[in-house]
Image (cartoon, grey):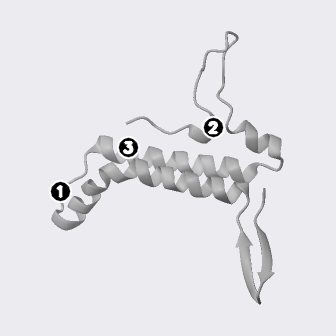
Amino acid sequence: MEDVSEEVDGETVVIKGLKSKAIDTVKAQAAGLLNPTDWYVTRKAETGTEIPADVLTYREAVRTASGAIESAIEACSTLEAFMALYETPVDADDNPTGNAPINDWPEV
């Protein structure tokens, strides 16, 4: 699950493990969720026009979720714990009751 370093032709090559790959995916997902509202940030920087409160709240929620998901990935010490991040919680009737921890992103 961890990164591995190897010497190849006199250079160190890092082979990313499951955790690093999962964190890369989380960062890309967060960037994708923030992208549609990035123009508000650009407009604020260029013209001083305020960013709507709901947009700021959503963007902060995305960053918070990203941090929490990344922390959950880092905390995994076994493959089983890592795999559990992908399990969607269900009730007694097998109906989903929420998102898998790895996909627990805020809604727009």
On the rendered structure, is 37 left or right of 46?
right
Report, in whole angstroms, how far the alpha carbon at label 3 lies from the one at label 1. 17 Å
Quadrant placement of the C terminus: top left
Asked if residue 108 is positioned above or below residue 16 in the image, the reply reads above
Count residues near mark 1 (Cα–Cα under 10 Å), then give few for <14, some for 14-19, many for 20+.
few
**Gap between marks 2 and 3 measured at Cα:** 21 Å
Residue 52 x %, y %: 25, 45
Return the residue at label 3.
57
Within 10 Å of disc 3 (Cα), the crowding (few <14, some 14-19, many 20+) is: few
* Residue type of the residue flagged with mark 3: Thr
Give me the C-alpha separation between circle 1 and circle 2.
36 Å
Q: Secondary structure at mark 3?
A: helix
Name the front one of labels 1 and 2: 2
Which residue has dot 2 on it?
A: 101
Instruction: Tell me which residue sits at (54%, 49%) in the image.
Output: 66
> Element under label 1?
loop
Residue type, label 1 = Thr
Q: Residue furthest front?
A: 9
Q: Above or below — where is 81 with respect to 13? A: above
Mark 2 lies on a secondary structure that is: helix
| Residue at 76%, 87% in the rendered image | 9
Report the disc number at residue 9. none
User: Which numbered disc, 1 or 2, marks the residue that appears first in the sequence?
Assistant: 1
Residues 28 and 6: in front is: 6
Between tags 2 and 3, which lies in front? 2
Q: Earlier in the sequence, mark 2 or mark 3?
A: 3
Q: Which residue is mark 1?
A: 49
Location of the N terminus by quadrant is: bottom right
